[in-house]
């Protein structure tokens, strides 16, 4: 899909490759087709194996590829050779020259893994991430594994001042937002384009 001068390729589950002719970025690649070309940057939202997949990072990286990830993914990523790893946490911003990356919160508020509803799948205190990525005048928000959370309110201005805003939102329920919650998030964010993700793979 082409939009605002970038190409967005859905890889399945929560994975995407975004290219603008100058730079290429993969986000949470998982079970990637062998035909997908290598990229300059790989962004990982958290350490679960369907988001931080060693074989897919190896497949998409080449010598010098920069992998950006939170601390919980670090031990997995160090197994990949000839890359450069940048650790990041919520609130951090990285200027990578050809693009800018901001790490934002991603967590559950009502998706529980215990019958007493005390333990969520993606706790706030784990520091899991979404990303705001700036490709010139196009801003892409990859929400990560999350529910509709108050911090999304801070992202509502990205579609203003001649910028184009794309939101990649999970929709499968159980572990993340369901379709109705994702629609609420889209209504709040008001992106120029919303793309559903986190479905079809049968994993969290």
Image: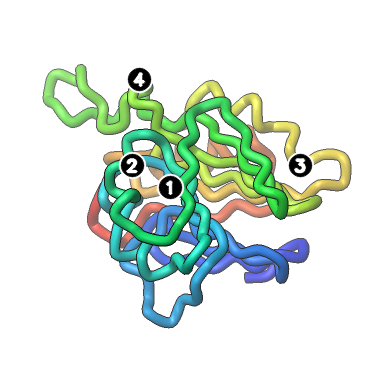
For label 4, the residue is 125
Of residues 21 and 147, the one nearer the viewer is: 21
Q: Give the quarter of the image for residue 176.
A: top left
Label 4 with label 3: CB-CB less than 8 Å: no
Spatial CA distance of label 2 from label 4 is 15 Å
| Labels 2 and 4: the sequence-earlier one | 2
User: Above or below — where is 165 with respect to 94?
Assistant: below
Q: x, y (%) of residue 124?
A: 37, 22
Looking at the image, is mark 4 or mark 3 nearer the viewer? 4
Return the mark for residue 73: 2
Spatial CA distance of label 4 from label 3 is 29 Å
Q: x, y (%) of residue 64?
A: 52, 61
- The reply to whether residue 192 is visible in this rendering is no
| Labels 2 and 3: the sequence-earlier one | 2
For label 3, the residue is 159
Mark 1, secondary structure of its residue: loop
Callout 4: few (<14), some (14-19), or many (20+) C-alpha neighbours within 10 Å? few
* Residue closest to the far left: 115
| Labels 1 and 4: the sequence-earlier one | 1
Label 2 with label 4: CB-CB less than 8 Å: no
| Labels 1 and 2: the sequence-earlier one | 1
Return the mark for residue 44: 1
Looking at the image, is mark 1 or mark 2 nearer the viewer? 2
Q: x, y (%) of residue 110?
A: 32, 26
Q: x, y (%) of residue 148?
A: 47, 31
- Please give the name of the residue rendered at 20% of the width and 17% of the height, measured from the top-left corner: 118
Label 1 with label 2: CB-CB less than 8 Å: yes
Mark 2, secondary structure of its residue: helix
């Amino acid at each position: 899909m082409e939009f605002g001068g970038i190409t967005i390729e859905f890889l399945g589950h929560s994975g995407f490759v975004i290219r603008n002719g100058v730079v290429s970025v993969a986000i949470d690649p998982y079970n990637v087709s062998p035909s997908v070309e290598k990229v300059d940057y790989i962004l990982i939202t958290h350490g679960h194996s369907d988001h931080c997949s060693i074989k897919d990072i190896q497949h998409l990286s080449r010598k010098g590829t920069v992998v950006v990830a939170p601390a919980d993914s670090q031990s997995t990523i160090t197994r990949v050779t000839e890359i450069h790893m940048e650790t990041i946490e919520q609130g951090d911003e990285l200027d990578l020259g050809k693009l800018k990356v901001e790490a934002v919160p991603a967590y559950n508020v009502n998706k529980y893994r215990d019958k007493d509803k005390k333990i969520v799948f993606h706790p706030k205190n784990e520091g899991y991430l979404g990303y705001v990525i700036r490709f010139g005048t196009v801003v892409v928000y990859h929400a990560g594994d999350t529910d509709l959370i108050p911090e999304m309110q801070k992202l509502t201005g990205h579609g203003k001042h001649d910028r184009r805003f794309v939101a990649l939102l999970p929709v499968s329920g159980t572990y993340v937002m369901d379709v109705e919650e994702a629609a609420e998030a889209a209504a709040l964010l008001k992106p120029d384009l919303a793309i559903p993700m986190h479905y079809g793979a049968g994993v969290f």
